[in-house]
Amino acid sequence: MNTNDALRPSKVIDEEVKWDKSKTIISKTDSVGTILYMNDTFEEASEYNKIELIGEPHNIIRHPDMPKVVFKVLWDNLKQGNNFHAIVKNLTRTGRYYWVITDFDVEKDETGKITGYTGRRKALPEKVVKKIEPLYKTLLEIEKIKGEKASELYFNSYLQEEVNSSYEDFVVNLFEKETSNSKENNGEAPSKESGIIKKGINWFFFGETDPK
C-alpha cells in the first residue's frame, strides 16, 4: 500500500515529541495495514488527527531511521497470526520522533482468516533506546550500502551470536529488565498488571491504559 506523501513531513527533525508517556497508544488496522481507528493518545504522540489518518496506511508514520528488516520480521509474524512485540521509532506530522514498544492482537473471522490487527504501544525507558539504537543504525547502514538481504543476514547473526535469542525475546527481555531497574531505582515495588498476558508475560500494561 502506497503512503500519502502529502501527509509526510517535509523534513525530519532530530527532536523527540512531547506526549503523555503514561498512556497507551492504540490503533486498529485491516489485514493490509490501513488505519481504521486511532485513540487520542495516538493523535497526541503522532501529531496527526484522526481525519488525516483514517484510511491511510500505517507506514505513514515510519521513521527513516528504522531498518526495513525489523518491519519484515514484524509483518512475517503478524501474517502468521502471531502476536508480536517490537521496538519502533516513529515519525510525527512535524518531523519529530517518538520511541515505543509494540504489542499486537491478531483478529480473525470465524474461518480463521486474519481480518486486522489492534496495536498497542508504550513509551520506552531511555536506557532501552540507547541499547537498541546502535543496532538499528548498523542495520540501516548495511541496508543502504549492501541491500536489505545483507541487513537481514547480519540481523539474524547478531541475534544468534550477541544475544542468543529471537528478536522478540530480545525486545521483551530488554524492556522488562530496564523497566524493573527503573522502578527499583525509584524505590517502587513491581506493579500489578491489568490481567492482559501475552506469551506468558504480564509487564506490558504496567500503567494506566487509555480506552479513548
Image: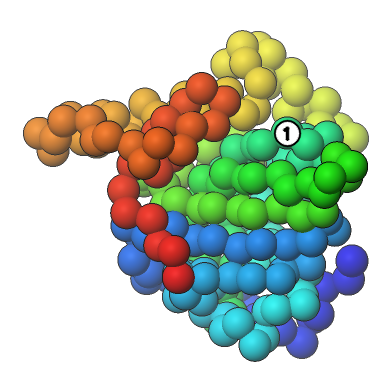
- Looking at the image, residue 184 sits to the left or right of residue 62; the answer is left
The quadrant in which the N terminus is found is bottom right
Instruction: Kindly identify the residue that appears in the image at 48 percent across and 32 percent down.
Output: 197
Question: Is residue 174 left or right of 68 when viewed as pictured?
Answer: left
Please tell me whether residue 149 is drawn above or below residue 125 in the rendered image. Answer: above
Q: Residue at x 57, y 84 (%)?
A: 49
Residue 10 in picture, x, y percent from top left: 68, 83
Relative vertical location of residue 148 with respect to residue 35 in this rendering, above or below? above
Please give the name of the residue rendered at 64% of the width and 45% of the height, measured from the top-left corner.
105
Q: Position of residue 29 (x, y in %)?
A: 73, 62
Could you tell whether 175 is left or right of 109 in the image? left
Which residue position is annotated with label 1?
82
Q: Position of residue 211 (x, y in %)?
A: 44, 64
Q: Which quadrant would residue 165 be assigned to in this image?
A: top right
Identify which residue, 153 or 41, lies in the foreground.
Answer: 41
Residue at the farthest front position: 110
Q: Quadrant of residue 166?
A: top right
Above or below 128: residue 4: below
Image quadrant assignment for residue 202: top left
Foreground of the two, 17 or 81: 81
Front position in the image: 110 or 55: 110
Query: What is the quadrant of the C terminus in the image?
Result: bottom left
Q: Residue lying farthest left?
A: 187
Residue for point 73% across, 48% down? 107
Secondary structure under the numbered disc 1 in the rendered image? loop
What's the residue type where badge 1 is placed? Asn
Circle 1 packing at 10 Å, graded few (<14), some (14-19), many (20+), is some
